[in-house]
Image (cartoon, rainbow, N blue to C red):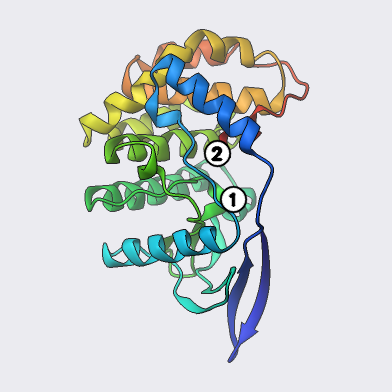
Amino acid sequence: MGVESIVIAGRDAWLKAYAQDDGRRLSLGLLDALARRLDIEALRPPPHPGGGAAKRVEARRIGELAALGVRVPRVLGEGDSTLLLSDLGTTLAAHLRAAEDACAVDALTTRVIDAIAAAHARGAYFGQLVPRNITLDDSGRVGFIDFEEDPLEVMSLPQAQARDWLLFAFGMAKYYDGRTDVLAGLLSAALQQAPDVAAHAGRVGRLGRLARTLGRLGRSARQIAHSILVVRAATVLPMLLAAALLWDLIEDGELELVQLLF
């Protein structure tokens, strides 16, 4: 998949081309087998089509989300395996990197969590809900991008919404290193409004032992560990317990397990 920034009639837009095969079948199959084995349906990866099939999935999902009042790109044009999409503003990832202090990070996180929870309440779900796929424009409006897969092909709506929170927690963990209890508290407030979704997300607590092991293996592994413990804290355990566990996550290295999630 490739994305190119272009300007049309003085406005920013994005030309998105969908590759035929991204070579992730093995890793996605392994993750699916693991999720089934652990009975954590929210971690199952949906099919990840390529080419025209991926384009059609994304175009359909953009239409569905727009009908629910979710801020998503407009489809300005399309080809056999391309979409021309309107621009929604700067990504949350860029905003977080530019944030001056923890208060600014928390304000951004709260705004985005509120937008996710509101969309979920209207029946929406996303798929790859990480900071690079969330936007904020100059007015502070939250938008969402990147929908070339459909989690409902392999799970229920509450499970798909739980998956959104799990991936969001993973993506946000590195911005809360040393303050993961704060992130857990922010997520907890949203999850309390959707107990069925929280129940599915809370199943990731079964990976608590794995999280503590991963936390000692490296940077990427530690981010996964953070997300597991954050969601566990937000749905099952007292936040202070999660904070105590996170003090152990201090060693460094590399283990690119994040590729299993996408």
Asked if disc 2 and disc 1 are in contact, CB closer than 8 Å, the reply is yes
Q: Seen in the image, is 131 located left or right of residue 64?
A: right
Q: What residue type is labelled 2?
A: Gly
Question: Residue at point 29% right, 28% down?
Answer: 198
* Mark 2 and mark 1: Cα distance apart in space: 9 Å
202 shown above or below 64: above
Q: Nearer the viewer, residue 41 or 201?
A: 41
Q: Which amino acid does label 1 sit on?
A: Ala
Question: Residue at point 57% right, 11% down?
Answer: 212
Q: Which of 70 and 54 is in front in this view?
A: 54
Q: What element carries label 2?
A: helix
Q: Which residue in the protein does label 2 denote?
A: 171
Question: Residue at point 28% right, 33% down?
Answer: 197
Q: Could you tell me residue 241's position as x and y percent?
A: 42, 11
Splitting the image into 4 quarters, where does residue 233 fall? top left
Q: Could you tell me residue 139's position as x and y percent?
A: 43, 69
Which of the image's four quarters has the N terminus? bottom right
Splitting the image into 4 quarters, where does residue 238 fall? top left
- Number of residues whose C-alpha sits closer than 10 Å to that of mark 2, classed few (under 14), some (14–19) or many (20 or more): many
Q: Which mark is residue 110?
A: none
Q: Could you tell me residue 227's position as x and y percent?
A: 51, 27
Q: Which residue in the protein does label 1 denote?
A: 93
Would you say residue 178 is visible in this rendering? no
Question: Residue at point 35% right, 14% down?
Answer: 237
